[in-house]
Amino acid sequence: MKNTVVTLQKQKDEHDKITMVTAYDYTTAKIMDESGVNTILVGDSLGMVMLGYEDTLSVTMEDMIHHTAAVTRGAKNAFVVADMPFMSYQTSVYDAVVNAGHLMKEGRANAVKLEGGVEFAPHIKAIAQASIPVVAHLGLTPQSVNAFGGFKVQGKDIEAAQKLIEDAKAVEEAGACMVVLECVPAKLAKKITEMLKVPTIGIGAGADCDGQVLVYQDLLAMYGDFRPKFVKVFANVGDAMREGMAAYIKETKEGTFPSAEHCFKIDDSVIEKLY
Ligand code: KIV
Ligand code: NA
C-alpha cells in the first residue's frame, strides 16, 4: 500500500510509529521500499555520504533532482521526501515554490523538506498552497552549520527550548505535514510531539517522537568518517562489502573465479575448425 500524507497522519493518530530512512539511488531505494519502510528521505546528507563533501552546503538543485528521480523510480510504496538544498529556498518565497516544484515535477517526489521555523513559515505556507506537501526540519539544521559554529544539540536552555516550541507551532500553522526534529533533548521532543497535530520524526530526539529517521550509511555501518551519538548500527553492511570484495579479489587472483558455472559454452567442433 502506498504511504501518503493521509496514512502518515493516521499513523500518528493511532500511535503506530512512522519509519523513515534515507536513500539516494534506484537500487538502494528499491531495497528500502521492499523492506516496508514508510517513508524515504532523499536527504541533502547526500553531499556527505554520496559525494564526499564535508557538509551539505555544496549540494545543488541539479544534484537533488538527479538523485530524487532515481529514488522515486525505485520506490513503489514509500512516501518519498526530497530535501531542498542550501540556497534553493532561503533566497525568497518565490524561489522556494519554484524549486519545490522542480523536485515534484522532475524528481517525482511526494513532498519536500526545508530547514527552518518561524522565519520560514511564509515559505512553507506558499509551498503548501501550491499543493506540495512540505516537511519542516528543526533543531540541528545542518545548513546553518556556519551560523551555529559547529554541529551541536539545540534547544537546551529556556530561550532556545521555547524558540523551538514556537518554531514547531509556526510551521504546523503554516501547513507543514510533518516535522523532523534533529538533536533535540528527548523530553523537549516529547513535549513538541504532544503539542503538534502533525507527526514528528526524530533523529537524536528520543523515542517519543511519532517516528524515527536515520541515514542508511549510518544504520548499516557503511560511512566510517564520523558516527554521531544518536546512531545505532543495525547491520554491518560495510564489513559485509569489505569481506565480499576481499573474496572476489582473492578468487580472481587465484583463477578460481570464474568457474565453469559462470562461463559460456561453445561446441569443441567450432573451436577445432578455427585457424
Ligand atoms: O539530509 C538528511 O539526511 C536529513 C536527515 C538527517 C533528517 O535531513
Ligand atoms: Na537534510
Image (tube, grey):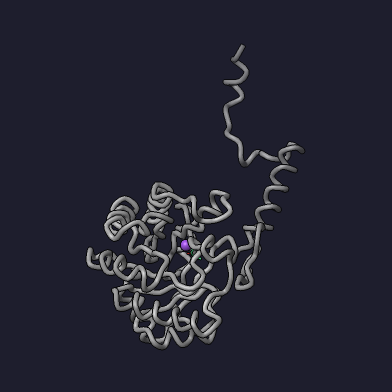
Please tell me in which quadrant of the rendered image residue 237 appears.
bottom right
Query: x%, y% of residue 66?
Result: 40, 48
- For this orientation, the residue located farthest to the right is 254
Compared to residue 203, the image places residue 59 above or below, namely above
Q: Is residue 2 left or right of residue 249?
A: left
Give the left or right position of residue 70, taking residue 248 as reference. left
Specify whether residue 270 is in view.
yes
Question: On the rendered image, what quadrant is the N terminus found in?
Answer: bottom left
Which residue is depicted at the point 53% across and 60% down? 146
- Image position, residue 7 (x, y; %): 33, 76
Of the pair 61 and 261, the residue shown nearer to us: 61
Q: Nearer the viewer, residue 255 or 66?
A: 66
- Relative to the observer, which residue lies in front, 125 or 69? 125
* Residue at the outermost top position: 275
Q: Is residue 169 left or right of residue 224?
A: left
Q: Position of residue 255 (x, y in %)?
A: 73, 36
Residue 1 appearing in the image: no
- Which residue occupies 58% across, 49% down? 52
Q: At which x and y percent is residue 149? A: 57, 64
Q: Residue at x 43, y 84 (%)?
A: 193
Q: Is residue 158 above or below residue 253?
A: below
Q: Quadrant of residue 99?
A: bottom left
Residue at position x 39%, y 72% in the image = 117
- The correct choice, above or below, for 194 with respect to 255 in the image is below
- Picture quarter with the C terminus: top right
